[in-house]
Image (cartoon, grey):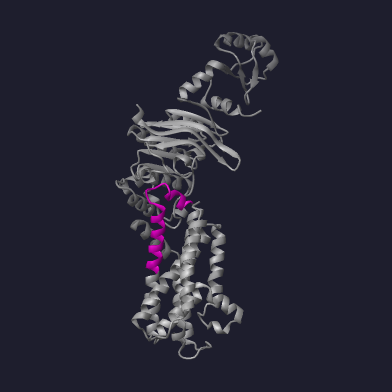
Amino acid sequence: MANDTAVAVEELTKRYGGRTVVDAVSLRVDAGAVVALLGPNGAGKTTTVECIAGFRTPDAGTVQVLGADPRADRDEVMARMGVMLQEGGTYQAATPREMLRLYAALYPHPLDIDALLERLGLTEPARRRIRTLSGGQKQRLNLALALVGRPSVLLLDEPTSGMDPQARLDAWDLVRELRDDGLAILLTTHFMDEAERLADVVAVIDGGRLRAVDSPAALVAADARTGSHLLVTSVENVDIAGLAAAVGAAVTPDGDGRWLLEAGPEAIPRVTAWFAERSLTLTGISVNPTSLEDVFLRLTRQGEP
Amino acid sequence: MRAQSAMELRLLLRNGENLLVTLGIPVGLLVFFSVVDVLPVRGRPVDFLVPGVLTLALMGAGMVSLAIATGFERFYLVLKRLGATPLRRTELVAAKIAAVLTVQAVQVTIVVAVAWLLGWRPTLSPSGVLLAGCALLLATAAFCGVGLALAGRLRAVATLALVNALFVVLLLISGVVFPLAALPATLARLAALLPPAALTEVLRAAFAGTALGVDALVVLALWGAAAPLIAALVFRWE
């Protein structure tokens, strides 16, 4: 349904000087969905988000948030969008509670501040100066500031970088909860697990261009079909050339005691036979261990010579 | 906007260096030189000091502390982040001005009260008070404009250093603790073209009940119009 589309980006292009940092990116975020913009540093993630947040004017293409232009229809968009910057954004001498109270006053129907502080584990430092907070606490405060106005659209730029593992899991739970409440959520990340476990749709971006857009499962499945492989683990010294010749597939070392074979499950008997004939111990063999990381690395290497 | 203004005000008052520049130094100078009679002026020192001390206080709030606060807000992306809230930029600037005006009202009250205790008794006329009020507003526009232009373009630490240096230099060349006439003629002429000396001159005439120099009002009007305009042109939000 078109009216469920909360964020619509069409052919967005942004240049700094002569350099194109975002190149004809098209993206859609629906209500009740999490879209992860996944890419290495400098891929154009933040610039894309900043165009949607109205901080930058696109050089070409259009951005629509809830059917409006974030720059031309600023008031309309800002009342319904929550933004979390990668860093900064808060008065260093203020306390989290003061900061939230200020932001609450800027929106027509804000959330309850105490409940929000509690939910994000900020009750304890709520009365401390922001400059004394840890990096993870500042991140959680920035998330709280993005949420306090009850937005319909949420833009999160690297929301969990700097958070400890528990805070990260809590933030993921919160994002899922918000999605289930019907928010449209666009987040950027360079963490594979974050994209894989949190996003309904992953958009892989590199060098300013979208390389693939699909659900994490579909991305992995598509990659697995084209490049089926086996992961072999062993504590022995493996003769790579010998194994490759016996199996009839390329073998590449993948770290200590791990080898990747460019072959499907039909090659498993030949692998186990090769180890058995030489009385070598095979500690593990698995089919299609393609992860989102494999897909990501393959997609983001395309730009390289 | 009221919430934003209250926040600005709370943070201005929370900062110790701010209070030093906005109240500590001006009131300290007023008391010290009123009590220790070393100034090269005729008449009672307090009568000479009040106009310049008021100028210094207003400059401390409008230029120095506003510039430093705004410079660091830019550095910490506070202004950028507010750009993604319903608060408009005009409202943000208005909130800052409202906070500065509130601080200035407190400054004027304290300086006048302290001066009164030191025996200051100005000769006020309705037209003098009116002109003094206009001069205060024009000078505030000029001070805030200069402060925001610097804060909106330079790095935060550069702004910090520059406005503090300006504060000291202008303290010396604006007729605050000694008359402009004591300066070399060229420097005195140059200083008279800057807002602090012009404001001091207008206030001095207003409190003495003497005729006002048109020149000083023209200087204030030009700076009061030009500085905010320049600030609006050069300001970068992040």
In the image, residue B54 sits, relative to residue B152, either above or below, namely: below
Residue A13 vs residue B15, the one in the foreground = A13
Q: Residue at the location (47% across, 54% down)?
A: A131
Residue B101 on the magenta segment: yes
Residue B60 on image: x %, y %: 47, 70
Corner quadrant of residue B103: bottom left
Q: In screen coordinates, is B205 left or right of B170?
A: left
Corner quadrant of residue B54: bottom left
Q: Quadrant of the C terminus of chain A?
A: top right
Is residue B50 shown to the viewer in this render? no
In the image, residue A188 sits, relative to residue B92, either above or below, namely: above
Residue B207 vs residue A37, the one in the foreground = B207
Residue A146 on image: x %, y %: 39, 44
Q: Residue furthest bottom?
A: B43
In the image, residue A115 sits, relative to residue A178, either above or below, namely: below
Q: Which residues are magenta?
A: B77-103
Query: Magenta: predominant secondary structure element?
Result: helix
Q: In screen coordinates, is B11 left or right of A204?
A: left
Residue B169 on the magenta segment: no
In the image, residue A123 sits, relative to residue A8, either above or below, namely: below
Residue A182 vs residue A244, the one in the foreground = A182
Q: Quadrant of the N terminus of chain A?
A: top left
Q: In screen coordinates, is B5 left or right of B33?
A: left
Q: Residue at the location (42% across, 74% down)?
A: B135
Residue B159 on image: x %, y %: 54, 62
Is residue A26 shown to the viewer in this render? yes
Q: Residue at the location (36% across, 80% down)?
A: B127
Residue B87 on image: x %, y %: 38, 51
Total number of numbered discs in the rendering: 0
